[in-house]
Amino acid sequence: MTPRKPVDTGDPDRLYTVTGGRSRADDTFDLVTLVVSESEPSAGMQSEHVRILEMCRHPTAVVEIAAELRLPITVVRILLGDLLDMGRITARHPRAAESVASLPDSALLKEVLHGLRNL
């Protein structure tokens, strides 16, 4: 078995620069929060902010943004907090089922899966 490579969390100097030295992330964003751009990038914006706005023209999960930018989640949450404060993005949280009874019947889901496999 080959040894695993350590996860690259980025150059600390670069991450410090990207966040302006901040280390506290906005609690608004969890991994599955969907982010949507509300405006186009403007001249002089930080490159990471520009990439986020371009990427989020359609709803995109925070975890997907972090993967695409190759940045730690905490750094991405800081950047998203900046954009939210500027009114450049909106954040949507997936709705959770109110109860187990409100979830679809497992037999129905099996029928849908069977139908999809037959396509």
Image (cartoon, rainbow, N blue to C red):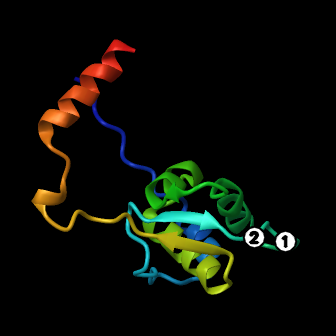
Q: Quadrant location of residue 63?
A: bottom left
Q: Quadrant location of residue 96?
A: bottom left
Q: Residues within 10 Å of mark 2 (few under 14, many from 20)?
A: few
- Residue under numbered circle 1: 42
Q: Nearer the viewer, residue 8 or 90?
A: 90
Residue 113: give its label. none
* Tag 2 near tag 1, CB within 8 Å: yes
| CA distance separating discs 2 and 1 | 9 Å
Provide the secondary structure element on which disc 1 rests: loop
Q: Position of residue 18 (x, y in %)?
A: 63, 71
Q: Position of residue 66 (x, y in %)?
A: 50, 57
Name the image quarter holding the N terminus: top left
| Direction from residue 41 to residue 86 in the image, left or right | left
Q: Quadrant location of residue 24?
A: bottom left
- Residue under numbered circle 2: 39
What's under tag 2, amino acid-wise? Ser
